[in-house]
């Protein structure tokens, strides 16, 4: 019987690469901008840029991380959507 670790092959999906940039106000949260890239590292204009929001809530048990997608096309739109989307994510948690 082969060792399961010997059979495990981890490979990046070369057709689904992104450059990640992080923006923060150092108070409330973080916005991650994921820019699609081609395998050679050049921008892939055929796929949209994605924005993800992150914040945390302090609870008696410790910090609870909250992650959510921002339906934005630009960083400015993502910043404007951060508060309302974060509040909705907190309510759903």
Image (cartoon, rainbow, N blue to C red):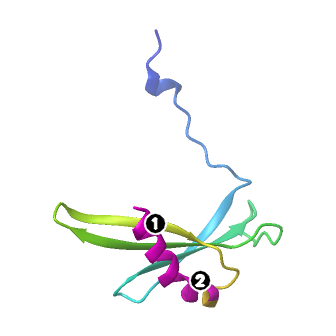
Q: Is residue 8 magenta?
A: no
Front residue of this view, candidates 41 and 47:
47
Q: Is residue 81 magenta?
A: yes
Q: Which residues are magenta?
A: 77-93
| Whether residue 40 is situated above or below residue 32 in the rendered picture | above
Q: Which residue is mark 2?
A: 78
State the residue lying farthest toward the left. Answer: 60
Residue 5 point in image, percent of width and height? 44, 27
Residue 24 point in image, percent of width and height? 44, 85
Q: Is residue 67 left or right of residue 33?
A: left
Residue 66 point in image, percent of width and height? 40, 66
Q: Main secondary structure of the magenta part?
A: helix
Q: Which residue is mark 1?
A: 67
Q: Residue at x 46, y 8 (%)?
A: 1
Q: Is residue 39 left or right of residue 6?
A: right
Front residue of this view, candidates 44 and 76:
76
Q: Is residue 86 left or right of residue 41?
A: left
Residue 10 point in image, percent of width and height? 55, 40
State the residue lying farthest toward the top. Answer: 1
State the residue lying farthest toward the right. Answer: 46
Q: Is residue 50 left or right of residue 26?
A: right
């Amino acid at each position: 019987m082969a060792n399961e670790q010997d059979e495990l092959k981890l490979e990046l999906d070369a057709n689904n690469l992104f450059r990640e940039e992080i923006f923060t106000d150092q108070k409330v949260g973080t916005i991650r901008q994921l820019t699609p890239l081609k395998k050679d590292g050049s921008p892939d204009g055929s796929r949209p840029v994605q924005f993800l929001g992150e914040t945390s809530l302090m609870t008696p048990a410790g910090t609870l991380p909250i992650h959510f997608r921002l339906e934005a096309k630009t960083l400015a739109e993502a910043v404007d959507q951060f508060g309302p989307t974060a509040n909705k994510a907190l309510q759903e948690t």
